[in-house]
Image (spheres, helix red, strand yellow):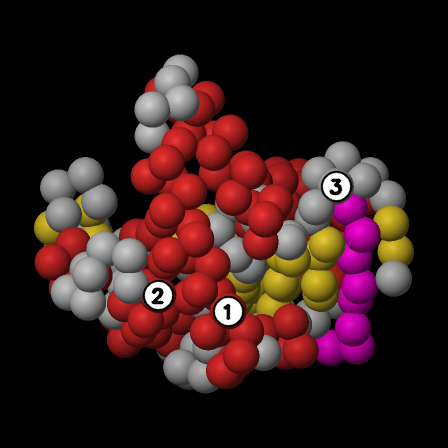
Amino acid sequence: MDQGTRGELVSRLAEAVGAVTAAHPLRVAIDGPPAAGKTTLADELAVVLRARDRDVIRATIDDFLVPRAQRYRRGRYSAEGCYFDAHDHAALCRVLLDPLGPGGDRRFRQTVYDADTDTPSSPPAKTAPSDAVLLFDGVFLLRPELIDRWDLRIFVSVPFEQTVKRARDRGEALTGSTADTAAIERSWRDRYIPSQQLYFATARPAEHADVVVYNDQLHRPTWEVRPH
C-alpha cells in the first residue's frame, strides 16, 4: 500500500499503463461508485499520458446510457434498475471495446447516446493508432459482462457516506442552491448506493482490479498496485 500526492498517484498509474504490452490499443477501466472521483482521475491521467506522447481516447459510461424510459422502467429510485437497466453494454462492446481489442479493426465510436436529447447518437467512426490508450470511466465496469474486455482495471474506492456528501456539495456548486439536496440524497440512498451494494455482492469489483485507489483523501490518496 502506498500513499502520496495526487501527482505521485497519477504518475504511478501512468507507469502501470506503460507496463502493459498489447498488440492493440490498451483499454483501461476506471471504475467506482458515483462521486468517487473517477472522471477527474481519468482526466488527470490523460494529461500525463499525452505528455508522454501516448494517444489517449477518453470515454465514459454516461455516453452509453439507454433511453430514460427504459432506464427507469422499474422506477426512478430502483437499485435493480440502476444496475441492470441503465447502460447498453452490448453497444459499448460493439462500437468501442471490441474494435480496440484483439482482432479488432480499431475503428471506434465513443458514444451511442445523447443525454441532452435522450436520443441515440451515432457520430462518425474514428480509427485509433495501435498504441493508443482508452481511458474509460464509469460505474459497474468490472461486472461479468465486461470484465474480460479490459487490459488494465482501476477501481476508485470511497466510503459511500462520503460520496453522498460529495454529491450534495457538487449539486449546490452547480445550482448555487440547496433546493435539490433532498432529491440528490434520495437518489443516492435509494438508488445509487443500493445498486453499488448489489454490484459489490455479485461482482466483487475490487477483487478484480489491478490497481485500487483509496480516494477519500483527494490530496493525499492511498493506492495498491497488484501484479498484472
**For mark 2, what is the residue?**
79
- Closer to the N terminus: mark 3 or mark 2? 2
**For mark 3, what is the residue?**
217
- Closer to the N terminus: mark 1 or mark 2? 2
The residue range painted magenta reads 221-228
Mark 3 element type? loop
Q: Indicate whether residue 175 is drawn in magenta.
A: no
Give the amino acid type for the residue marked by disc 1 in the picture. Gln
Mark 1 element type? helix
Examine the rendered structure and indicate whether residue 226 appears above or below residue 191.
below
Between the C-alphas of marks 1 and 2, the distance is 9 Å
Q: Considering depth in this image, is 195 or 179 the residue closer to the camera? A: 179
Q: Do tag 1 and tag 2 residues touch (Cβ < 8 Å)?
A: yes
Q: Considering depth in this image, is 54 or 228 the residue closer to the camera? A: 228
Image quarter (top left, top right, bottom left or bottom right) of the N terminus: bottom right
Give the amino acid type for the residue marked by disc 2 in the picture. Ala
**For mark 1, what is the residue?**
197
